[in-house]
Image (cartoon, rainbow, N blue to C red):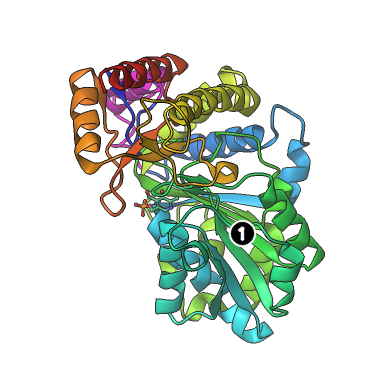
Amino acid sequence: QYYFGAGPAQLPKPVIIQLSKDIVNINNQGIGIGEISHRSKLAQDIIDNTRENLYKLLSNNGNIDIEDIKKQYDVFFLQGGGTTGFSSIPLNFKKYNQAQNKKGGYIISGSWSLKSYQEAKRLGCDVVPLYNDKEVNGEFKGSYTGNYETLLSKHDDLSYVYVCENETVNGIEYDQTLKELAKVCKQKNIDLISDLSSDIFSREINIFDYGVIMAGAQKNIGIAGLTLYIVKKSILANIKTSGNIEELPIAFDWNLQNDNNSCYNTIPMVPLHTLNLVFEHLLNAGGIVAQEKINFEKAEMLYDVLDKYSLEGNNEKKFVKLTVSKQFRSKMNVVFNLKTTDLENDFVKKAEASGFSAIKGHRSVGGIRVSIYNAVKLEAVESLIKFVEEFAEQL
Ligand code: PLP
């Protein structure tokens, strides 16, 4: 049985085993992790430990100095998911932007960045779309490929540029061009804000490229109920002086939450503890460097077999339609269509009968989506590839 769901997603087996024990009895206290006060010493220790482990992961196996990261970035966790991030980001910047005559620029490369932009607009925040791939290409196929210097030079009043680094629904993930965007942002003193909900800790990132990282936990790093924020201290200081507390929903106030060790209100301890178990698991398994290697291998193998049967190729059994441009293919969510809807239904049915579940595409786009997050093992992808080959044989 192999599970390829897009989220909530599979967790590493050792994490689930430990979690099930801790739900009943954490640290031999005779009580479960979901039952203790978030203000207890044990809970506070877990929160601190989670943050420490997160800093370790951000150091890319020690290649970046952890003390440097700590000097520049704060980390806090709030109740919620990705969507609460869509609201809290523009709201935290709202007053600051008003005072500075600035706005947030959004690069729209799929459903989630579009939703995030729409939410900022709905909340009356000053935001502007910088690029919309659907408007350019008719459907979401990738992201901006031009010169970022040129793109950003059209706006001289941006405080931040927002991207969704992996579009979970559309199967679109940034490549090296993100580094270019980060570089241009830095030159222009603009903060890069990224939604990393579906690819955080799947590969190395350079934390210093970012102003804010926001991620819902329930894909690569845990279970639903929690949003992770990594925010540059200078941003927290700027928005604090703007006096935004008057307008912000109190639970969204980044400074208030950060000043209270993520405990201004009740932090959900089960998701938080799960996050920490995942972090410990990742660190014990060779850190992000090792995880990235496996993830790249899984994605490459899977795309190879799909390319082999691509409708654009010469294989006499060809049946696969890949719409995302090669440059932006997601290494987390492999999204594709088949020649006909009937064939897609047949593929999903046969896959399920063979033990491969949750591969149906998102309801808004249809097709097939195979999510191969960190916890999905190489062996699962190898088995699925075998299934694809057998399916092609029967055509
Ligand atoms: N951002 C991304 C990249 C996502 O994949 C999702 C959910 O799948 C969201 C945001 C929204 O997250 P939530 O459902 O936790 O609000």
Left-right relation of 83 to 391: right
Q: Is residue 1 above or below residue 243?
A: above
Left-right relation of 293 to 274: right
Give the residues drawn in magenta, as a range: 12-37
State yes or no: residue 306 in magenta. Answer: no
What residue do we see at 72% from left, 63% from top? 148
- Residue type at numbered disc 1: Tyr
What residue do we see at 26% from left, 41% from top? 340
Q: In this view, does 392 lie above or below 104?
A: above
- Percent across and percent down for residue 114 are 44, 64
Residue occupying the far right of the picture = 187
Instruction: Determine if residue 329 is in view.
Output: yes
What residue do we see at 81% from left, 63% from top? 187
**Badge 1 element:** loop
- Could you say which is closer to the camera, residue 317 or residue 203? 317
- Could you say which is closer to the camera, residue 62 or residue 256? 62
